[in-house]
Image: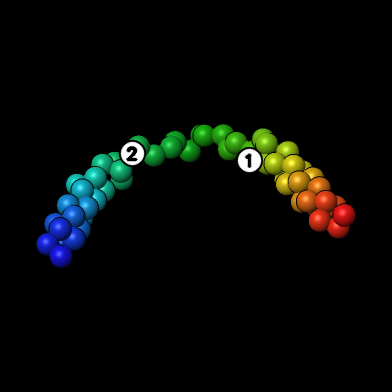
Amino acid sequence: MKKYILSSFFALALFLVSAPTLLAQPGFDDDVEDTPIDGGIALLVGAGIAFGFKKKVKEEN
């Protein structure tokens, strides 16, 4: 039980020390161009559909 309390205290202390550092990142200016997300997502969706179709056909045989 003592080991559990000590490890929980250590994890809490680590979180409290690192949280301000994570929030201290600079923000973006207003003139930043938005980037489209559709780089490879269409290929991944197509591969997923093909994989599912292949498994379905193999399951029926």
Q: Amino acid at mark 1?
A: Ile
User: Where is residue 28 drawn, in percent x and y?
Assistant: 43, 37
Instruction: Name the element at disc 2.
Output: loop
User: Where is residue 47 drawn, in percent x and y?
Assistant: 74, 42
Q: Which residue is mark 2?
A: 25
Does the rendering let one see residue 49? no
Q: Which mark is residue 37?
A: 1
Q: Residue 3 vs residue 39: left or right?
A: left
User: Where is residue 30 drawn, in percent x and y?
Assistant: 48, 38
**N-terminal of the two: label 1 or label 2?**
2
Does the rendering let one see residue 55? yes
| Residue 53 position (above or below residue 39) | below
Q: Residue furthest bottom?
A: 1
- Quadrant containing the N terminus is bottom left
- Quadrant containing the C terminus is bottom right
* Residue that appears at 30% across and 43% down: 22
Task: Pick the residue in front: 60 or 21.
Answer: 60
Instruction: Name the element at disc 1.
Output: loop
* Residue that appears at 35% across and 37% down: 26
Q: Which mark is residue 53?
A: none
| Residue 13 position (above or below residue 41) | below
